[in-house]
């Protein structure tokens, strides 16, 4: 039972352009949402979070958008850089303790 | 200022043996979480511990798996009588307070368990 879904397993973007990674969830009780970035053979690294009381949170080149009515989350990276190439996971939680992770989207930024 | 330290990085066990995975949280972090990533899947929550207490073990398989976080020393995830389906990457994360809702957890680099 996958409560958090990332339907695009991979995405390729030209350097300098915008990367948009999408995430859908099914549980209306989720109140906390996170994005993580993961390189091979390393643990996930926290990128950005948003709570359900907001619809947007921005941190430098990274912006997360939340549409609660659609149960949809997206991460925008602009401008994309080659170092952004990694697997991106979205995660959601009702309490902020146990997080449910998506299966990840592998982003490749082409120089 | 070391991050979350997990060891070993790679662990090979034969079917039926025991696997012990260790996690030392970041300095000042008293909350530890264990996640498992099976091939081609996302991370799945297993257990949430504070010092000497299991807070939420809803993601732990009912048999063969146990976790502890003693007053002194690292957190241990123990898998008894391993089977091939236990082969996965096991990640530990820590946070300074309850929940990683605002700042996320800090993850370790994981232990890759292979059961042969």
Image: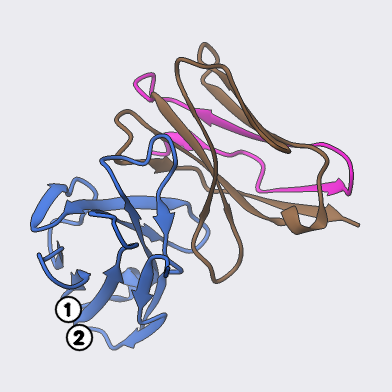
In this rendering, would B60 be left or right of A54? left
Q: What segment carries the magenta color?
A: A1-30
The colour one sees for chain A in the rendered image is brown
Q: Dot 1: within a 10 Å radius of its alpha carbon, few (fewer than 14), some, or many (20 or more) residues?
A: some
Identify the secondary structure beneath mark 2. loop
Q: Is residue B100 above or below residue A26?
A: below
Q: Nearer the viewer, residue B101 or A102?
A: B101
What separation in Å lies between label 1 and label 2 (alpha carbons)? Answer: 5 Å
Q: Is residue A105 magenta?
A: no
- Estimate the x, y position of residue A96 in percent, counting from the top left: 33, 34
Residue that mark 2 sits on: B17
The spot of residue A11 in percent (x, y) is 75, 46
Q: A23 or B62, which is in the foreground?
A: A23
| Element type at mark 1 | loop
Q: Which residue is mark 1?
A: B81
Q: What color is chain B drawn in?
A: blue
Which chain hosts label 2?
A: B
Callout 1–callout 2 Cβ contact below 8 Å: yes
Residue at 58% x, 33% y is A23
């Amino acid at each position: 039972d996958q409560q958090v879904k990332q339907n695009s397993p991979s995405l390729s973007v030209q350097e300098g352009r915008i990367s948009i990674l999408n995430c859908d969830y099914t549980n209306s009780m989720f109140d906390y949402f996170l994005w993580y970035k993961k390189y091979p053979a390393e643990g996930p690294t926290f990128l950005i979070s948003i709570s359900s009381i907001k619809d947007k949170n921005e941190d430098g080149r990274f912006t997360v958008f939340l549409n609660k009515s659609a149960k949809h989350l997206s991460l925008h990276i602009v401008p994309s850089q080659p170092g952004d190439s990694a697997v991106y996971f979205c995660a959601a939680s009702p309490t902020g303790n146990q997080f449910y992770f998506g299966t990840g989207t592998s982003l490749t930024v082409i120089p | 200022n070391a991050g979350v330290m997990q060891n070993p990085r790679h662990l090979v066990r034969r079917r039926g043996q025991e696997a012990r995975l260790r996690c030392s949280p970041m300095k000042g972090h008293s909350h530890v979480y264990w996640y498992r990533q099976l091939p081609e899947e996302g991370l799945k929550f297993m257990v949430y511990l504070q010092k000497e207490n299991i807070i939420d073990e809803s993601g732990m398989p009912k048999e063969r798996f146990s976790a502890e976080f003693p007053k002194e020393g690292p957190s241990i995830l123990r898998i008894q009588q391993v089977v091939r389906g236990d082969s996965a990457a096991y990640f530990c994360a820590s946070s300074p307070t309850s929940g990683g809702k605002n700042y996320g957890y800090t993850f370790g680099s994981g232990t890759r368990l292979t059961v042969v």
